Amino acid sequence: MADTPPLPPEQRPTPRWPLILGGLLGGFLLVAAGLGLGWYLFYRPVVNVAVQLPPPPPPPAPPGPDQAQVKALEDQIDKQKAANKQIEDQIAALKDRLRQDVCTMKDPLGTKEPGKEPSQTPIPPGGQKT
């Protein structure tokens, strides 16, 4: 083959590799920017709401008991003891009343002894009439 003479600079073919490389690099940067913005604007807030960290533990309690609270609790305990004592007294009084003799039609004195008859006159079979 014959050697072709060199072409003048105006007619020389320009290389295409810088355009291809620039297009690929620009496309990659656009895709990366789109993914970054999508993550920042959409994915991050959704994940932060869906997967929340547990709340931090409460601060430790003070080293000693609060004297005002201790005094208030002791006062409350004393009041409750007084109320319990009053209820226990009521229960004891009611138990005593249950043990007492009961007056009925058959036993008006409430003796509860089957062999002992009352000293009063018996009630007539028709009941009392006034």
Image (cartoon, rainbow, N blue to C red):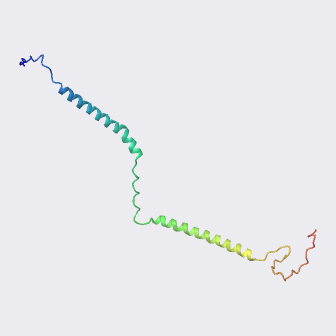
In percent of width and height, residue 92 lies at 68, 74
Determine which quarter of the picture holds residue 46: top left
Is 121 in front, or is 3? 3
In percent of width and height, residue 81 lies at 58, 70
In percent of width and height, residue 44 lies at 36, 41
Is 19 in front, or is 70? 19
Residue in view at x 70 percent, y 74 percent: 95
Image-based side of 50 in relation to 117, left or right: left
Is 3 in front, or is 29? 3
Residue in view at x 60 percent, y 70 percent: 82
Residue in view at x 54 percent, y 67 percent: 75
Residue sitting farthest toward the front? 1
In percent of width and height, residue 130 lies at 93, 68
Image-based side of 14 in relation to 83, left or right: left
Residue in view at x 55 percent, y 68 percent: 77
Image-based side of 28 in relation to 49, left or right: left
In the rendered view, tell whether residue 96 sits above or below residue 40. Answer: below
Is 94 in front, or is 71? 94
Determine which quarter of the picture holds residue 41: top left
Q: Could you tell me which quadrant the N terminus lies in?
A: top left
In the rendered view, tell whether residue 108 sits above or below residue 42. Answer: below
